[in-house]
Image: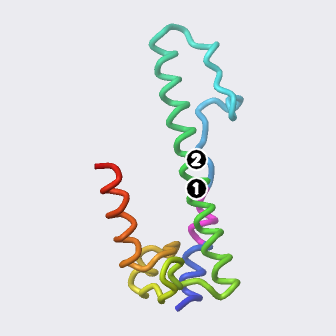
Amino acid sequence: MQGTLRKQLLNTLSGLTPPICPDADMDDTPRLDACADENEYASRVVEVGMQLALRRRMEARRGEIEDALARMDTGVYGVCEDCGDDIGMARLLATPTARLCVHCQSERETAQYLRCA
């Protein structure tokens, strides 16, 4: 089963590509100086912000997947980082990058919710 999960993670990792910028010369430096008017400038600012947010999310996801693959290589994949119990197979199939069992994840989310309230 871990082999199937590894393939799923590797396929997801290979599918992560950076968002394509509308301007070929734009890469990481937004060309806001080339805008015709304030409306185009505002649209470009929003567009660049969304591209950066997508890129950050993609990089975070890539890191989660690489961490899961590293845990597989070291033999600790599927073991909860908090309590040391096995993470259920259903959870791993749903979320292959899970680091915590359902119980510990639930406790963390409840504690975070209470801190924010």
In three-dimensional space, the C-alpha distance between marks 2 and 1, rounded to whole angstroms, equals 6 Å
Q: Which residue is mark 2?
A: 56
**In this picture, residue 88 sits left or right of residue 31:** left
Local crowd size for mark 1, using a 10 Å CA cut-off: few (<14), some (14–19), many (≥20)? few
**In this picture, residue 91 sits left or right of residue 30:** left
Segment tinted magenta in the rendering: 11-16
Residue 38 included in the magenta stretch of the image: no
In the depicted view, which residue is nearer to us: 36 or 1?
1
Q: Residue at x 57, y 13 (%)?
A: 35
Hey, what amino acid is under mark 2? Answer: Arg
- On residue 60, which mark appears? 1
Q: Residue at x 51, y 74 (%)?
A: 99
> Picture coordinates of residue 115 (x, y %)?
35, 53
Coloring scheme of the render?
rainbow
Q: Is residue 40 above or below residue 25?
A: above
Hey, what amino acid is under mark 1? Answer: Ala
Q: Residue at x 48, y 89 (%)?
A: 86
In the depicted view, which residue is nearer to us: 81 or 75?
81
> Picture coordinates of residue 21 (x, y %)?
61, 36
Q: Residue at x 47, y 88 (%)?
A: 85
In the depicted view, which residue is nearer to us: 67 or 11?
67
> Picture coordinates of residue 113 (x, y %)?
32, 56
Q: Is disc 1 placed on a helix, strand or loop?
A: helix
